[in-house]
Image (spheres, rainbow, N blue to C red):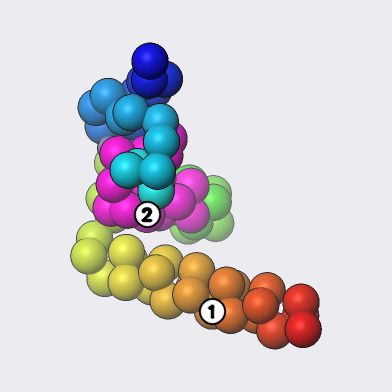
Amino acid sequence: MSTVVNCPNCKKQVIWGPDAPYRPFCSKQCQLIDLGEWAAENHKIATQSGNDQKVTPDMIEDIEAMLAQAESEAGFFKE
Ligand SMILES: [Zn+2]
């Protein structure tokens, strides 16, 4: 008996469990895209550049770097 959730980004079904480390997202990419859209949403308010802002691979790399840094900082503060 598995719990199945829908990926908030692409709506693909994700089986909730150890095989889905990015749950509720289906993949790391969807997790990052969701974070990217959240960031773009904030950015939009500042720039008033309208809608349809796309998350580019560059942005995903930036977000990944940001997350990695946050993770290492969190680890550092735990020491
Ligand atoms: Zn997805």
Residue at the disc numbered 2: 32
Circle 2: element type: helix
Residue type at the position of mark 2: Leu
Residue at the disc numbered 1: 69
- For marks 1 and 2 on the same chain, the one whose residue lies earlier in the sequence: 2
Of all residues shown, which one is farthest toward the top? 1
Return the x and y of residue 26 as percentages of the image width and height.
Answer: 30, 39
Return the x and y of residue 64 as percentages of the image width and height.
Answer: 39, 69
Residue type at the position of mark 1: Gln
Binning the other alpha carbons within 10 Å of mark 2 as few (below 14), some (14 to 19) or many (20 upward) gives: many
Q: Is residue 66 left or right of residue 78?
A: left
Return the x and y of residue 15 as percentages of the image width and height.
Answer: 33, 28
Is 12 above or below relative to 48?
A: above
- Residue occupying the point 41% across, 36% down: 17
The quadrant of the image that shows the C terminus is bottom right
When asked about the image quadrant of residue 25, the answer is top left
- Residue occupying the point 70% across, 84% down: 76
Which quadrant of the render holds ligand 1? Answer: top left
**What range is drawn magenta here?**
23-39
